[in-house]
């Protein structure tokens, strides 16, 4: 098995989910008491969140590239970035390393295409919903259109992510608000929903909504294991 390098800590709640998923997937594929060969470089999310809201993506890029280099030097044979939002600097990371980089959109789009969906609702941070670094990749590479909530919906989803989910805080009130936003996206023509922030899977599960939910954390982590095992 190739050693997977994970750039995590954004937040550590979702990185914990990544670690559990990749090990469960490895055991499911190999049996017995097998677990994943991996390295995790975890950053301080307080610093990352501050720089995100200051718009200092140049500094964030430097930080992510440095993390990728450390993983590669440590023996990682492929790299995954355990967050949707920081894929804004994915090209910088991919261009600076000598091992494969698995983009979260590519892994997710492959699963979406199996269902032949063409229009999906995207729930994510405001950075991911209002910038085009995720949405354009879905459209340009996979012909998948993504729609996002209205202004109030985007504000509420972003606030819940940064004030609650990254801290592991789960409330019925926030879950209900997410379900309302999802319903509005479905009413606007979304055939399914992309949980485009790695913490959303802590709050919303596939059985909670009437359409398919594409869990980017689960999809990304499991695809990494399949690639690492040559499956």
Image (tube, rainbow, N blue to C red):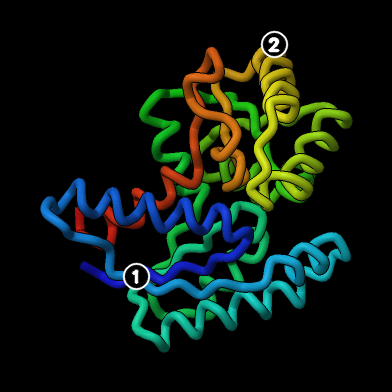
Using residue 3 as the reference point, say whether residue 136 is left or right of it: right
Residue drawn where x is 30% and y is 72% of the image: 3
Residue 39 image offset from top left, x and y in percent: 39, 74
Residue 223's tag is none
**Tag 1 near tag 2, CB within 8 Å:** no
Q: How many marks?
A: 2
Question: Can you tell which of label 1 and label 2 is closer to the viewer?
Answer: 1
Give the mark nearer the N terminus: 1 vs 2.
1
Residue drawn where x is 65% and y is 66% of the image: 89
Rendered view: 79 above or below 112: below
Where, quadrant-wise, is the N terminus in this rendering? bottom left
Rendered view: 184 above or below 42: above
State the residue in front, 205 or 77: 205
Residue 187's tag is 2
Residue reaching furthest to the bottom: 73
Residue reaching furthest to the left: 32
Q: What element carries label 2?
A: helix
Residue 119 image offset from top left, x and y in percent: 59, 24
Residue 107 image offset from top left, x and y in percent: 43, 47
Residue drawn where x is 48% and y is 57% of the image: 16
Using residue 102 as the reference point, say whether residue 159 is left or right of it: right
Q: What is the quadrant of residue 219 in the picture? A: top left
Binning the other alpha carbons within 10 Å of mark 2 as few (below 14), some (14 to 19) or many (20 upward) gives: few
What residue would you read off at disc 1? 38
Residue drawn where x is 53% and y is 80% of the image: 96
Binning the other alpha carbons within 10 Å of mark 1 as few (below 14), some (14 to 19) or many (20 upward) gives: many
Q: What element carries label 1?
A: strand
Rendered view: 141 above or below 34: above
Residue 23 image offset from top left, x and y in percent: 30, 56
* Structural distance between the alpha carbons of marks 1 and 2: 42 Å
């Amino acid at each position: 098995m190739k050693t997977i390098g994970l750039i995590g800590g954004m937040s550590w709640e979702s990185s914990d989910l990544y670690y559990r998923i990749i090990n469960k997937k490895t055991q499911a594929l190999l049996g017995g008491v097998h677990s994943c060969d991996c390295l995790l470089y975890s950053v301080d999310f307080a610093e990352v969140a501050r720089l995100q809201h200051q718009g200092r993506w140049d500094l964030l890029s430097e930080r992510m590239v440095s993390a990728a280099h450390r993983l590669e030097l440590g023996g990682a044979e492929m790299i995954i970035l355990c967050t949707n939002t920081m894929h804004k600097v994915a090209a910088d990371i991919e261009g600076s390393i000598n091992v494969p980089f698995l983009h979260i959109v590519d892994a997710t789009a492959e699963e979406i295409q199996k269902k032949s969906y063409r229009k999906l609702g995207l729930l994510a941070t405001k950075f991911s919903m209002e910038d085009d670094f995720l949405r354009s990749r879905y459209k340009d590479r996979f012909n998948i259109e993504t729609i996002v909530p209205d202004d109030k919906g985007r504000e509420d989803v972003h606030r819940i992510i940064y004030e609650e989910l990254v801290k592991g805080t789960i409330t019925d009130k926030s879950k209900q608000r997410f379900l309302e936003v999802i319903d509005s996206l479905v009413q606007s023509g979304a055939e399914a929903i992309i949980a485009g922030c790695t913490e959303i899977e802590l709050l919303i599960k596939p059985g909670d909504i009437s359409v398919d939910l594409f869990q980017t954390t689960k999809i990304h982590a499991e695809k990494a294991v399949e690639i690492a095992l040559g499956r």
